[in-house]
Amino acid sequence: MARLKGTKALGVGFEKAVARALPGALHGPWYEFVDRDGHGFCQPDLVLVLAKLVLVIECKLSDTPAARAQLGELYLPVCALAHHRPAKGLVIVKHLKPDSTKVFGRLSEALQALDEQNAPCLHWIGRGALG
């Protein structure tokens, strides 16, 4: 297996740091599904199965609309069906961009914003508690 380099290695390292900070979450679980395009597989970064909901977390070095799109169009529907409960999304990023929206500095604040349509963004530098 080839060793990761550059930005890809940094991104995987950040994802692993988030996984260590959320020890109850499933890290990189695979899901098999069938949709209008046929048979497929997907692998969200982190999945936290709670009593009444599934929290699907996408980890990115920088905030990007693509993360929210991937959550809403693929991971949330698949995880909701797989775990038989509603699924909500959260994006955790290390770096913000000028157009970043719905940004929170503490996990508790981001979790309170889950009811809205668009996944909130948690800004975390990769060390310390998620807050």
Image: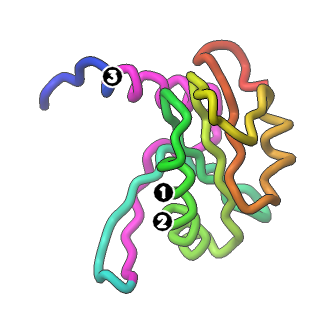
Q: Element at badge 3?
A: helix
- Say which amino acid is labelled 2: Leu
Residue at position x 48%, y 44% from top? Answer: 45
- Say which amino acid is labelled 3: Thr
The residue lying furthest to the bottom in this view is: 36
Residue 32 x %, y %: 37, 70
Mark 1 burial class by Cα count in 10 Å: few <14, some 14-19, many 20+? some
Residue at mark 1 to residue at mark 2: CA–CA distance: 6 Å
Q: Do the residues labelled 1 and 3 touch (CB within 8 Å)?
A: no
Quickly name the residue at label 3: 7
Q: Give residue 74's mark.
A: 2
Q: In this view, does 57 lie above or below 74?
A: above
Q: Is residue 20 left or right of residue 36?
A: right
Q: Element at badge 2?
A: helix
Q: Element at badge 1?
A: helix
Q: In this view, does 4 lie to the left or right of 87?
A: left
Residue at position x 77%, y 26% from top? Answer: 105
- Say which amino acid is labelled 1: Gln
Magenta residues (range): 9-35
Residue 22 belongs to the span the image colors magenta: yes
Q: Do the residues labelled 1 and 2 touch (CB within 8 Å)?
A: yes
In which quadrant will I find the N terminus?
Answer: top left
Q: Which of 62 and 25 is in front in this view?
A: 62
Quickly name the residue at label 1: 70
The residue lying furthest to the front in this view is: 98
Q: Which of 105 and 52 is in front in this view?
A: 105
Q: Which of 83 and 68 is in front in this view?
A: 68
Residue at position x 73%, y 62% from top? Answer: 117
